[in-house]
Image (spheres, rainbow, N blue to C red):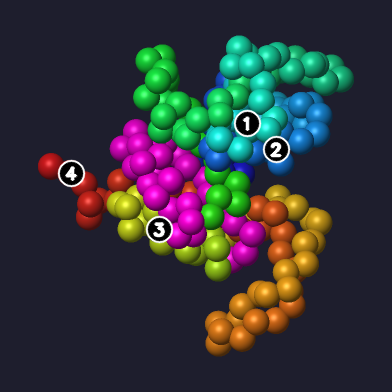
Amino acid sequence: LSLRRAFGDTAVSQMTDITVHVIGAGTSEMYGSEQKFYEISNLIPTLQKIEIVMVGPYLKTFQRDLTANVCDPWKDSTCRITLTTSTELYHDYVSKDPTWTPPTIAVAQNSGIHDPRFKELWRETALLLIEKEVLFVVTGFTAAEAEADAATLVGWGAKVEQPPQENPFRSLRPFFDSIAALPSGETVPDFYYTNAHFSMIRGRAASTQRT
């Protein structure tokens, strides 16, 4: 969905290979069969190669070799999928890899970029993605989180490609939140969903272009 909105249906329908960088990845992104990644090729049948790179310090508890792993084939798919991992912060990972090239798309799931506990850890990575004009998709558990993440990225100079909205591919499994906050500040029990809302940025906003 993000690729089609960013590049257009015609361009996406002609893609034969893509690279996806999952930033801030953890065990939740690695959980389950690697064959789940073949769903991407189901959505874009022309794909023959998908390179997935998981990057994040939380992967230390689920570490793989950095040598590319080829995922087991799925049914009669002819698409080749490779999966590599790094346990570094993304900007450190990029600085140490002289062969790094911008991915087709970068994704941060339920990242909490706006959260004061993580904001400074994200700043350098976000600025790198902005400068390299990488299509960057950020998801959040709630609409409020997605709005706050997007506002943080805009504050760092990002150009919004897709304002925050509900994600049609969000998880359908509800999680109970006993301290959900209303706009009034009142807290009430509520539910949230993984990847419930998302936004996209790419490049630097015109008003913040460097000369």
- What's the distance in space between the residues labelled 4 and 1, CA to CA? 37 Å
Magenta stretch containing residue 94, yes or no? no
Left or right: 68 in relation to 150: right
Question: Can you say whether 6 is above or below 67 in the image?
Answer: below
Please report whichever mark, 2 or 4, sits nearer to the chain's N-terminal start.
2
Residue 10 in sight here? no
In the picture, the disc for residue 27 is 2
Q: Position of residue 68 (x, y in %)?
A: 62, 14
Left or right: 153 in relation to 5: left
Which residue type does callout 1 highlight?
A: Lys
In this figure, which residue is indicated by the disc labeled 1? 60
Please report whichever mark, 1 or 2, sits nearer to the chain's N-terminal start.
2
Q: Position of residue 59 (x, y in %)?
A: 63, 33
The mark total stands at 4
Please report whichever mark, 2 or 3, sits nearer to the chain's N-terminal start.
2
Which residue type does callout 2 highlight?
A: Thr
Q: Secondary structure at mark 4?
A: loop
- Mark 2 Cα shell of 10 Å, populated few (<14), some (14-19), many (≥20): some
Magenta range is 115-143
Residue that appears at 61% across and 21% down? 84
Which mark lies nearer to you, 2 or 4?
2
